[in-house]
Amino acid sequence: MSTMVLSRLRPGEGGAFRLFASQEALLAFAIIGIAILVGLYNPRFLATRNLADIVLGNAYIAVAAIGMSMVIVSGNIDISVGSLIGVLATISGSLAVAGVPIILVWLTPLVVGLLVMMLQGAVIAYLRIPAIVVTLGMLSILKGGLISVTGGRWITDLPQSFHLADIELFGILPMPVLIMVAATILAALWMRYSASGRAIYATGGNAEAARLCGVSPRRTVVMVFALHGLFAGIAALLFATQLKVIQSTVPPNLELTVITAAVVGGVSILGGVGTVVGSTLAAVLIAEIASALVFINVSPYWIHAVQGILILVTVVADILRRRRRQVGG
Amino acid sequence: MAVLAPEVRSAAPRWLIRHETLLAAILVAALAILGLFNERFLTIDNLLNQGRLMTEVGLLALPMTFIIITGGIDLSVGSIVGLCAIMLGYSWKNLGFPLPLAIAFAIGVGGVAGFVNGLLITRVRVPPLIMTIATLALYRGLAEGISQARSVRNYPEWFFFTGQGEWLGVPVQLWILLVGIIVAGITLDRTTFGRTLYAIGNNETAARFSGLPVDRVKLVVYTLSGLAAGLSAWVLVSRVTTTRSDMGSGYELDVIAAVVLGGTSIFGGVGTIWGTVVGLVMIQLLKNGLALTGVKGDATIIVIGAVLIASTLIASSLHGRREVAG
Amino acid sequence: MKQSMKHRMMKTAALVILGVTMAGGAAVAADKWDGGDDLPTSPLACDAGPSAAAAAKPYDGGQTTGAPDKAGKPITLVDVPKLIGIGYFNATSKGMQDAAKEIGNVKVTTDGPTEAKIDEQIKFIDNYITRGVDGILFAANDPVAIAPVLKKALSKGIHVVGYDANSQPDARQWFINQAEFNGIAKAMVDAMAKEAGEDKGFAIVTSTFTTPNQARWIAEMSAYAAKCHPKLKWLETVEAQEDNVLSFSQATTLINKYGDKLSGLFGMTSVATPASAEAVTKAGLCGKLAVVGLATPNAMKPYVNAGCVKSVVLWNPVDLGYAATYVMRAVVDGKLKPGATSVDAGKLGKLNVINGSEILLGSPFIFTKDNIKDFDF
């Protein structure tokens, strides 16, 4: 069932439940709710600086989750994105240190990311190898390749102009937030209103039916992975330009975090359902929770357990919500 | 998962047997080549040692095969191993259980963890991928919290027999794995339970309407996965003589690689234990052979990744499997 | 309806668990700092000055069985650090290569896991045992878990020498200790007290609570601070793996959480310290919030030169790798035997044996604005 953002409410559904009718609304409510609750415990949580830091530091996850959501909606999965981001960050940093013009330094990861992912998409679509196999294999290839080529050397002499994430447009809009919001809105509109965007939902929902309707599932999959690679490239830029040092390693567990953001955002692993607005909100929520747990003094030994429970609760709540709606409550 | 073109896949079609045979042939060829490069590779000593080292992942790969055949997945196995390892130490040291009871308790905890996975997957209908991603985090977190980052060590001598000992010249844990393989293989191939797994993977709705106890079977396989993780944890703790909350981390990918390499389809309905064993052995011996030949760690990972993709490509293209892309 | 009841039940359950954890976390008396282990500590004297030499311990290292006599002959060594791909172990590796070139008949290869996992490290070592090397140099991810495979190496006649992170003494012949745990603790805490203030609050960014070296340092720092700087207030310890971005994120969260109450940050790994310094810089608190930690000079140059960080505590990891190689050569040549009190380590001169089978590199080295430009690693 393809349920779109706008067609959620049915006549007759009343009361406060209307607010919770969509996962996006639920997430937004959770973000605000947690902020208020934690703010009561420790007002410093609500300081502009802190809220800004939470979003700025994690915008790259939201951007990567946009691409991942598209991949999952199309009925596939990708576990190589973490390794790819590590590789792209290193490429970008190395070019910067070598004195390459900044525009090229920023564009190269996008192009390389797009090409690498498109290759995977082609192998999945045309060579009929399951996504989990291809991306699992690619994860290893990228990880090993990165260490092989760099020897694990850190990149330390980055030029000042490299730091895209520090730029503030017109002096007030930080680039990471700008890019995250713009990418989300553009992707959401594209998926909702354009033919190729809706083709993704069709492919994920029922590929055979989609084919019969004139959608080419194979071309759609390749396109989706290409876009995913583009977003991974943007995410890599935001990731790499935050700090003065680039570790030439793969950030640990990044792919799991991105998948979690997409899934908590309402994307269904069965394909065909979900929005990128949801995944962006989920990425923000996950980052907020990580910070919140420190602010409310959860014992550091139990932080991961609490995070696991929260993910579980969110996911179960989403499933129950969907089932309630289907049954017609 | 995307809907597949209507293609009947029965429990053990002839072409499937050929996939494993093909893989086994690739394996033998690879071993021969690596054996040429390094004389210490194909020695009994080394091969038995590799068998010892692959047991922990191997035990997990058996129920994982069952799970993937039903069209599900379990990403939390590594975390369950960590949790069970911690519970083994914790119940022995902090709760004062006698060590044999602690071992049984730890395995039991694994079963419960798997049961919880299965329960929420069958009753609440949480998709397995999502459920087990969540429990991957949760169980690891429980291991960290309960252990408070302390290790438990100084076990009695007899405890190390499982992980470091030998019986009739073969490492003890390898015997355990062999028994597991035989039991799993027979179950999958010869019992109604096994056939039910294939039925569920092929078409769950039809299986349900045929009156098969789909939910109960699924619950069982996820619980088995948890129990296997507990067993694996016991072997691991015995082998390295200590407990750590990060034990088992990353195992899930190794297990899935072995199962998928062995011909089990991620879409469900297809797969054999024999294939998983070949996949398991192939990855282990490939890593070992490459290391002995002087290939360093980073290059080895690249080769394994490439082999995974290439083998699946070769095997699937030779059988012209028709699956609508998606 | 059944589903919404389940929904509500789960929500309540989650909140209860959350509440209990919070209460539990707060209830734990913070006598010892989070992240420390529970082994006995031995804080040094509070005043400056070398500590009294500890009473000599009898040799407690392991021995090889049937090692071939390779005195004076070319040997092949393998170095298996905790993980590859971080500046610190790149530096130790470089030191080993320098020593190998100087000695002339030593060949060292560095190979190891890409993540700090003990199970991977064991498998690496195991493969090299099968391959047949003359000696293994290691930095252990876990002192007890690594013991069985090291003992296997010893039993096959392979020499085993550790550096940076020790194993159980009987699993290796010698261990190069960069600096005593309590010495490092003293240097760090003294620096923090001086830069932040005697009665100020500080937090710690470490890798994980299960990393043995870090846990030892934190425990020793806790004991030393209780003894010599009792008014220093420990606020919190956070984990950040060995990841740059995560360390930065955690440090930023701490700065935001405590505001003025936080006057100092300890970075316990070569990754955490530059990331914490960056967090302080980004927050505009350079000079107001002290950052003290272990790190390699190159990563810290921008911050030290900007005055954000006054002192970086370390030892010279290049020297550490260098010494380890010389010690291994001496062991193979039979020049370093159990019971020895010192060993010749090339350009480092004579290094002393302490604690039975440990060889001390020296005192912790402090990198400051004046000397940091002289180092390149």
Image (cartoon, coloured by chain):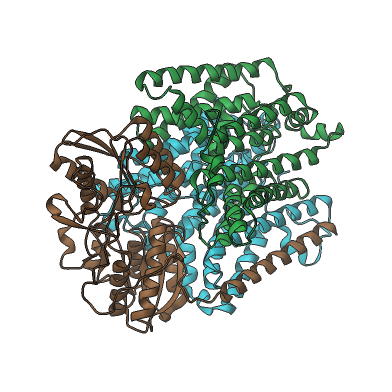
Q: Position of residue C99 (x, y in %)?
A: 17, 45
Is C224 on the left or on the right of B160, as rendered?
left
Which chain is the one coloured green? B
| In the image: residue B115, left or right of residue B297 | right
Q: Is residue C308 left or right of residue C250?
A: left
Residue A142 location, x and y as percent? 42, 38
Is C98 rendered above or below residue C10?
Answer: above
Q: Quadrant of the N terminus of chain C?
A: bottom right
* Quadrant of res B138: bottom right
Q: Which chain is brown?
A: C
Name the residue: 77% across, 67% down.
A16
Say left or right for C147 vs A214. left
> Residue A274: in sight, yes or no?
no
Number of numbered discs: 0
Q: Nearer the viewer, residue B25 or A37?
A: B25
Specify the quadrant of the image occupied by residue A165: bottom left
> Going 35% across and 54% down the picture, which residue do you hit?
C165
Q: Kindly tell me whether residue C148 is visible in this rendering.
A: yes
Is residue C95 depicted above or below C248 in this figure?
above
Q: Position of residue C251 (x, y in %)?
A: 41, 67
The chain whose colour is cyan is A
- Which residue is at 79% across, 41% downward? B215
Q: Observer-nearest residue: B180 or A329?
A: B180
Q: Position of residue B295 (x, y in %)?
A: 35, 31
